[in-house]
Image (spheres, rainbow, N blue to C red):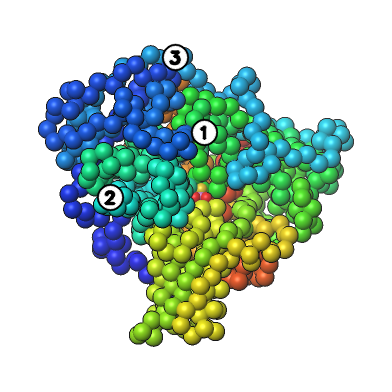
Amino acid sequence: MNRIEGRVKVTGLATYAAEYPVEGLVHAFPVQSQIAKGRIRQVDAAQALAMPGVLAVLSSEDPPELAAAASGELALFQSREVAYRGQLVAAVVADTLDNARAAAAAVRVGYDPDDHDVSLRADHPGLYKPDTVNPGLPTDTEKGDVEAGLAAAATVVEVTYATPVLHNNPMEPHAAIACWDDEGRLLVYDTAQGTTWSRDILARVLGLPADRVRVVSRHVGGGFGSKGTPRPQAVLAALAARAVGRPVKAVLTRQQMFDVTGYRTPTIQRLRLGADAEGRLTALEHVAYEQSSTLEEFAEQTATPTRIMYATPALRTAHRLVRLDVATPSWMRAPGEAPGMYALESAMDELAYAAGMDPIELRVVNEPDTEPHSGLPYSSRDLVGCLREGARRFEWERRDPAPGVRRDGEWLVGTGVAASTYPARRRPSRARAVRREDGDYLVQVAAADIGTGARTALTTIAAGALGVDPDQVHVELGDSDLPAAPVAGGSMGTASWGSAVVRACEELKSDGREGVADTTEEIEGDAQFARHAFGAQFAEVRVSSVTGEVRVSRLLGVFAAGHIIDPQLARSQFIGGMTMGMGMALMEETLTDEEFGGFLRRDLAQYHVPACADVRDVEAVWLDERDVELNPMGSKGIGEIGIVGTAAAIGNAVFHATGHRLRELPITPAKIL
Ligand code: MOS
């Protein structure tokens, strides 16, 4: 199917959060902290309040009322403590955006600064062991004796990798319009990956019952995790609207998005691998060091993919966190798996070279029978099939493993491979299906289409369950007044909502008129399996010996991700993820300002993502995988696996091309030369 909303999107008729026509709308514009740590002495708004069109200035001088439960990044203007440079410390509400912005620049904030610390180091004295890592996984795991395994190994690799701060950068900025009605009900048009959860969190922060808040988010221009929970713009719009008694729009600038909508933590990752003479792992250890803010603890699950990938008698994974004077990191497409698998799959390549083995064969001989850390059987796992099919398509058998020997004029040429994986989860969801008067079907679920094509995929799922033509099915989503549903996140949207849609459609078929479903009990009854999608990525790079520039001349992903519901949408998800992985490998990096705090490179002129000209030849294919244990569709999530492994495949290809192993992303010309 073509995307149902494709036409309204390309003709500009799709309404995004900032675009709703609301009568009497005024604008809020934030003021950001100029210091990285300290106290606000005073907020002088006199000059700003005298400027044209200004209606109010919000700040900690007169903190707007929030619930006691409000904390962290959403507790706007409640405290005089500054947690990081760029934090919102005040906001101006005015009749136009320009007037609000001009007045925001005239708000004078006085500070008592303290010394700050914004630098992640593996020997930082503030490192500690968090109770769990996102999304509630054990912080550390240990099986067998790693030291003994390393001592007994024929080949040992001990390496450290580093990945930088990365920013999600959805095309649509974070924006919200908030409207209070006469009964004190709040309507927020927000850009959200899930309206149910956004409603619940906003209600909690504002101290309202959930049924007095409605969040509408019909079209979302990308999120990649940064819209998984409400961001400050939604709270700001609500507080400002309450203060001035009019609807308020708050749209963050691209630069403000870098500061207050989350980012991928930088990581330092230490790996130790031992293998016997046949290449079988004798020990595998993965320790990740990462950061969070002083406001909130977010501990990324960086080392968790290492728990599920390869057979080994000794396996240890650990995470250590330090709370710095920085903004709070959060989800960014495949949090954990993306940086973690960059390190593991680069280290596996290093082990293959050290052991004199082909990197595909090394992975094949370490294929586990059951999930290594838990011992659970896999619901399905076809990593080997992905590696074999990719090798066939990439003509891997013709590859000379010798590094640094293929030259085409100034260009050094190399190829690399890496594995991909991502969990295949689902969460409870509700859905409703009704037969309309005209004979068509209406399907309602508070799902979010963040650009993935969820509307289209759910239409296909519902039509299949009803046994009718997709033209007869109309899916409504993106509104918290619809049946409650989990976020578009963790690659579990379609599996979660789709399960509920199938059950609602089944009930409609037996009832004749209406079906409502809640999958909570069904999911609680799911049998115990290790549930993951797998894949293999192959990269060919050309590295200029003159400029150090790396060009990815070919990128191939082969995935085993359950039943593919819509091939066209799936291909877009896979190659979109792989393209983002290319950015992670070669370009994307937000620098932290050590001297003043905050981030440098806060726009798309300096934070580089791949452009069309960077993506020469990218293709994704998939194996025909049947997995009956997951959900009624037999599907696995596909939103994130595409970014997992790409950076390692490219880094491994750069080694094959140049003979130099670079262990810090991104692989920029300066590092090559
Ligand atoms: Mo995704 S980072 O789980 O929104």
Identify the residue position indicated by label 1 in the image: 296
Whether pointer 1 and pointer 3 mark residues with C-beta atoms closer than 8 Å, the reply is no
Identify the residue position indicated by label 3 in the image: 114
Q: Distance between the residues labelled 2 and 1?
A: 29 Å
Quadrant in the picture for residue 651 = top right
Residue at figure coordinates x 22%, y 33% from the top left: 56
Nearest to the observer: residue 600 or residue 54: 54
At which x and y percent is residue 444? 43, 69
Residue at figure coordinates x 50%, y 76% from the top left: 515
Front: mark 2 or 3: 2
Q: Check disc 3: other Cα within 10 Å, few if <14, some if 14-19, many if 20+.
A: few
Quadrant in the picture for residue 66 = top left
Kind of residue indicated by mark 2: Cys
Q: Which of marks 1 and 3 is nearer the N terminus?
A: 3
Nearest to the observer: residue 581 or residue 134: 134
Q: How far apart are marks 1 and 3 (CA)?
A: 19 Å
- Report if the beta carbon of the residue with label 1 is closer than 8 angstroms to ligand 1: no
Whether pointer 2 and pointer 1 mark residues with C-beta atoms closer than 8 Å, the reply is no
At which x and y percent is residue 644? 57, 49
Number of numbered markers: 3
Residue 230 visible at all: no
Please tell me whether residue 256 is drawn above or below residue 36 in the rendered image. Answer: below
Numbered disc 1: secondary structure = loop
Numbered disc 2: secondary structure = strand
Please tell me whether residue 121 is drawn above or below residue 351 in the rendered image. Answer: above
Identify the residue position indicated by label 2 in the image: 179
Whether pointer 2 and pointer 3 mark residues with C-beta atoms closer than 8 Å, the reply is no
